[in-house]
Image: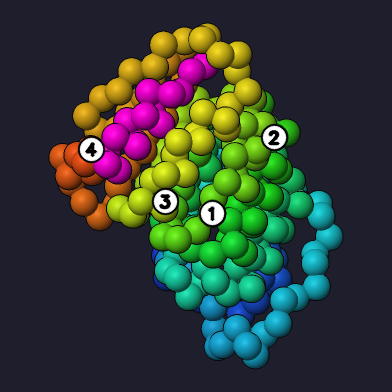
Amino acid sequence: MRRFEHLGHLLLQQVSFLSAHDLRRTFECLRNLKHLVFFCPQWLYSKVDHPPCRRPRPHSRIRLETLSLEAQAGWITDTRSIDFLDWLSASGAISNIRELRLWGLTLIDDGIIAAVSRMLCATQQSARLDTVDTILGPDVDWTPLHASLASLPRLNHLHLACPYDAASLSQLTDTRTMWSHPPNAGTGSTAPCGVSESNGCLLIVESVSVPWAKLLSGEIGMMLRGAVNGLRW
């Protein structure tokens, strides 16, 4: 891998690793890596056979500018995946990131939500982070992400996808608390596709299972429109 140490862009698709340590060592060889797309990674053998590895040293030479990650449920719930995400957070690898696109990393349990929250906290050092994408799983409490998102100084684009259920959509009524900007700093507006844009900040809320015509109708639609209309920057 050291032959590719000058590589700046990397796409890994359906590649299997034994441990988070192996994955970390692979990326450490790519000291000039800036843009990483990680599509459907896999772990070898059962996670039961490989308990969480020892925490690596917190320093990394990598400084990613963009990270795109898509993974299946088996990878998301594996403790090795949490170890890898925690390494990204603790090592400084995402301290200068501009786009954090976790569009294919469904937040399906408390473990992955906590790991993503730690990643967001780690990006507070970045004066460049502009875009965050993620997808919310069913029946999960994503309020732990509120404070982490609110602490991002340059966040201009937040793209959330959520399932079509009242429990998930009801949490959007608290979305306004994620930003600490003064009230009445801008005027929100609602578009049919669930977009709220005001004062240069764009929030996109998307349902992953039903058309927007259905989503915006009925009681849940009223709840969602209330959340979007309540946004003030």
Q: For the residues carrying marks 2 and 4, which lies nearer the camera in this image?
A: 4
| Residue type, mark 1 in image | Asp
Q: Secondary structure at mark 3?
A: helix
> Which amino acid, mark 4?
Leu
Per the image, the residue denoted by label 2 is 124
Q: Which residue is mark 4?
A: 216
Instruction: Measure the C-alpha gap from mark 3 to mark 4.
Output: 14 Å
In the image, which disc is placed on residue 168? Answer: 3
- Classify 18 as above or below 23: below
| Crowd rating for badge 2 (residues with CA inside 10 Å; few <14, some 14–19, many 20+) | many
Distance Cα–Cα, label 2 vs label 1: 22 Å
Q: Residues within 10 Å of mark 4 (few under 14, many from 20)?
A: some
Q: Is residue 127 left or right of residue 39?
A: right
Q: Are marks 1 and 4 in contact (CB under 8 Å)?
A: no
Q: How many marks?
A: 4
Dot 4 falls on a residue whose secondary structure is: loop
Question: In this orientation, which residue lies closer to the viewer: 80 or 107?
Answer: 107
Please state the horizontal and vertical placement of residue 141, each as a whole percent of the image.
Answer: 54, 54
Query: The residue under label 2 is which amino acid type?
Result: Gln
Question: How far, Cα to Cα, is label 3 from label 1?
Answer: 8 Å
The magenta stretch spans which residues?
219-233
